[in-house]
Image (cartoon, helix red, strand yellow):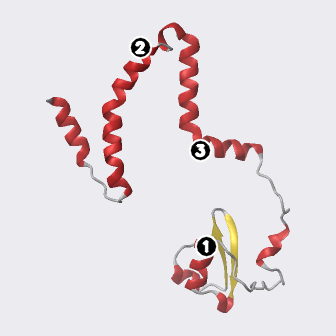
C-alpha cells in the first residue's frame, strides 16, 4: 500500500519512508510512530539505532543495489528537460529565428520592441509575486489590468 495517511500507516507492520525518491528509513512493528515517520520524512536522516528487518537487513544495506548507481542517459535528459525545458525551447526559438531571419530578428530595434511589449506583463507579474509568496492568491489583478488597458 502507498499512503500518506498516518492512520493507515500506523495499522501496518512495516513502513518504508521515502524522501525525494529515496528510501530514508524503514520502520517495523512498535517503531512505527507518527513522530518517527515525520522525522524521517522531513529530516531525511535515519534514526540513531537501525531498525532490523525480519531478514536481518538494516536500512543502510541498500537492498542489493550498487553503491554508486548512476541514472541512465534517458533519465538525465528527462530531468534536464523537465527543469529547464522552457528556457531551452526559448533559446531554440531565438536560434531558429536568428538563422532564418537574422537580418530582421537579431536587431537592437526588434529587442527594444519585444521588451516594450512584455513590460506591462512583467510589471504585473512582479506585483503578483508578493501575494503569491505570502500564499494569498489575488485573482482581481487580471480584471484591474484589463480595465486599465481599456482606459
Q: Decide which of tag 1 and tag 3 comes sooner along the chain.
A: 1
Quadrant location of the N terminus in the rendered image: bottom right
**Residue 110: percent from left, percent from top:** 42, 15
Q: Residue at coordinates 53% horizontally, 36% vertically from top-left?
A: 86
Instruction: Using the numbered discs, state the Cα–Cα distance from disc 3 to disc 2 in whole angstroms.
Output: 33 Å
The answer to which image quadrant residue 24 occupies is: bottom right
Please give the label number shown on residue 109: 2
Residue 1 visible, this orientation = no
Kindly identify which residue carries mark 1: 43
Disc 1 packing (10 Å; few <14; some 14–19; many ≥20): few
- Residue 82 lies left or right of residue 66; in this view the side is left
Instruction: Using the numbered discs, state the Cα–Cα distance from disc 1 to disc 3 in whole angstroms.
Output: 26 Å
Circle 2 SS class? helix
Circle 1 SS class? helix
Q: Decide which of tag 3 and tag 2 comes sooner along the chain.
A: 3
The answer to which image quadrant residue 17 occupies is: bottom right
Q: Is residue 43 above or below residue 93?
A: below
As drawn, the residue found furthest toward the top would be: 103
Q: Is residue 54 above or below residue 116?
A: below
Q: Is 133 in front, or is 69?
A: 133
As drawn, the residue found furthest toward the bottom would be: 30
Q: Is 146 in front, or is 124?
A: 124
Kindly identify which residue carries mark 3: 82
Q: Is residue 76 above or below residue 148?
A: below
Q: Residue at coordinates 54% horizontally, 24% vertically from top-left?
A: 93
Residue 38 visible, this orientation = yes
Q: Residue at coordinates 62% horizontally, 40% vertically from top-left?
A: 81
**Residue 70: percent from left, percent from top:** 80, 53
Circle 3 SS class? helix
Q: Decide which of tag 2 and tag 1 comes sooner along the chain.
A: 1
Amino acid at each position: 500500500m502507498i499512503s500518506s495517511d498516518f492512520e493507515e500507516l500506523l495499522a501496518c507492520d512495516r513502513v518504508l519512508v521515502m524522501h525525494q525518491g529515496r528510501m530514508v528509513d524503514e520502520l517495523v512493528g512498535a517503531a512505527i510512530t507518527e513522530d518517527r515517520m515525520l522525522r524521517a520524512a522531513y529530516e531525511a536522516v535515519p534514526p540513531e539505532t537501525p531498525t532490523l528487518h525480519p531478514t536481518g537487513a538494516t536500512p543502510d544495506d541498500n537492498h542489493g543495489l550498487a553503491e554508486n548507481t548512476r541514472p541512465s542517459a534517458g533519465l538525465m535528459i528527462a530531468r534536464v528537460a523537465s527543469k529547464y525545458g522552457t528556457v531551452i525551447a526559448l533559446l531554440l526559438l531565438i536560434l531558429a529565428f536568428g538563422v532564418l531571419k537574422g537580418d530582421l530578428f537579431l536587431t537592437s530595434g526588434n529587442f527594444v520592441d519585444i521588451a516594450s511589449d512584455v513590460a506591462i506583463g512583467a510589471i504585473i507579474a512582479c506585483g503578483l509575486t508578493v501575494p503569491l509568496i505570502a500564499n494569498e492568491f489575488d485573482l482581481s489583478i487580471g480584471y484591474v489590468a484589463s480595465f486599465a488597458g481599456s482606459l
